[in-house]
Image (cartoon, grey):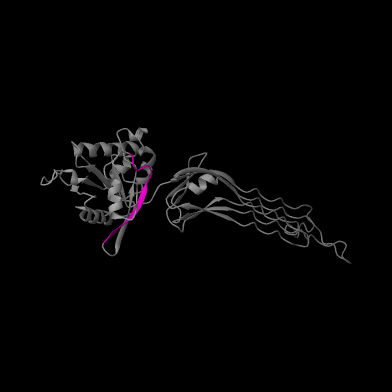
């Protein structure tokens, strides 16, 4: 099951209370303060991991609570710190504060780690409160309360190329042709019901990640079809590949409709470099070359015709983009 949004609650542990005690030993009836300090409460961290693909695990385990630190004891014995908890999230997860909506963490690299809830500081025992001015403190501190937060997690897959097209435009067939990804392929609309990622190899030493999302229809940005839910998964892509089948009565008009849907969802999407592809060229009668609009490429993912040239073209387009760059695509 592909889960790309969920909400979790995290509660860090409280700090342990400091101890109020005085040394009581034989021949020392009035010993000094000996209360130990409390231990720190456990914190909760979020860390990016490439081993996870969806938020499914977090969907079924929504509450995370760390232990509190141990209280201090007499004899100047400090309480133990509670262990921290690390929760793994998929690469590409954006963490929002569920109340304010503010972005708190964007998990883009496995080195990225975020303290979602900080454990409470342990209270000082009366031994730690001793000063020259106050050599006999008459109290100990209570431990501080650990942080508690409600977080909304949104997964946006990380890919170099995002495939865009109407349902049954041949996106899944193309992805399965050029990578080891195996999305469902069938001759009816909305076969793809979740994003798929595939690693596409170009030559011996080059590769890139390609993402296939469910097909778009007119009104997708308003919630029609399946596209609106998954459009966020191409927000991070560096290049878009727009596929229009060869049997389309007006490929340029269809491509413009697709870009209009992307623009309505987020104008930034149509600033990315775009490669327009006439797919399913095998549908054109034999001996009749497909009518290609200027600047377009043609391919048949079923037969393999034109596929290698398109992979190389996409590779060059990725190379031309620095991380964070946006291109501009226009259809007149």
Nearest to the observer: residue 249 or residue 235: 249
Q: Where is residue 330 drawn, in percent x and y?
A: 22, 41
Instruction: Decide if residue 232 is on the left or right side of residue 116.
Output: left
Q: Where is residue 16 drawn, in percent x and y?
A: 69, 53
Does residue 316 sit above or below 9 in this rendering? below
- Whether 173 is among the magenta residues is no
Magenta residue span: 190-202
Residue plotted at (36% across, 38% down): 226
Q: Where is residue 236 drawn, in percent x and y?
A: 36, 48
Does residue 191 sit above or below 87 in this rendering? above
Nearest to the observer: residue 6 or residue 95: 6
Name the image quarter holding residue 256: top left
Nearest to the observer: residue 290 or residue 237: 290
Quick one: which residue is furthest to the left in this view? 287
Q: Is residue 329 visible?
A: no
Does residue 321 sit above or below 233 in this rendering? below
Q: Is residue 263 visible?
A: yes
Instruction: Decide if residue 63 is on the left or right side of residue 3.
Output: right
For the image, the number of numbered tags is 0
Nearest to the observer: residue 285 or residue 269: 285
Q: Where is residue 266 drawn, in percent x and y?
A: 34, 39
The C terminus lies in quadrant: top left
The N terminus lies in quadrant: top left
Instruction: Decide if residue 61 is on the left or right side of residue 185.
Output: right
């Amino acid at each position: 099951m592909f889960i790309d949004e969920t909400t979790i609650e995290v509660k860090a542990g409280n700090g342990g209370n400091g101890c109020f005690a005085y040394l009581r030993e034989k021949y020392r009836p009035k010993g000094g303060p000996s209360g130990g300090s409390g231990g720190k409460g456990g914190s909760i961290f979020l860390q990016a991991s490439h081993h996870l693909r969806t938020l499914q695990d977090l969907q079924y385990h929504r509450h995370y609570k760390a232990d509190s630190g141990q209280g201090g004891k007499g004899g100047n014995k400090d309480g133990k710190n509670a262990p921290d908890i690390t929760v793994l999230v998929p690469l590409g997860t954006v963490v929002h504060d569920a109340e304010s909506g503010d972005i708190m963490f964007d998990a883009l690299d496995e080195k990225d780690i975020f303290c979602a809830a900080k454990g409470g500081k342990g209270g000082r025992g009366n031994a730690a409160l001793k000063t020259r001015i106050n050599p006999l403190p008459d109290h100990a501190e209570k431990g501080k309360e650990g942080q508690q937060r409600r977080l909304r997690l949104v997964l946006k897959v990380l890919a170099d190329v995002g495939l865009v097209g109407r349902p049954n435009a041949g996106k899944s067939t193309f992805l399965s042709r050029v990578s080891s990804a195996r999305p469902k392929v069938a001759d009816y609309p909305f076969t793809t019901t979740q994003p798929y990622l595939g690693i596409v190899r170009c030559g011996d030493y080059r590769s890139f990640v390609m993402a296939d999302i469910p097909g778009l229809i007119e009104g997708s940005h308003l919630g029609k079809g399946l596209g609106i839910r998954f459009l966020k998964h191409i927000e991070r892509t560096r290049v878009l590949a727009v596929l229009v089948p060869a049997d389309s009565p007006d490929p340029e008009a269809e491509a413009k409709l697709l870009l209009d849907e992307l623009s309505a969802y987020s104008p930034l999407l149509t600033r990315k470099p775009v490669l327009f592809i006439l797919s399913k060229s095998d549908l054109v009668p034999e001996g009749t070359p497909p009518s290609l609009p200027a600047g377009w490429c043609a391919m048949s993912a079923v037969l393999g015709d034109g596929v290698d040239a398109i992979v190389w073209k996409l590779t060059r387009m990725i190379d031309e983009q620095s991380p964070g760059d946006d291109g501009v695509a226009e259809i007149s």
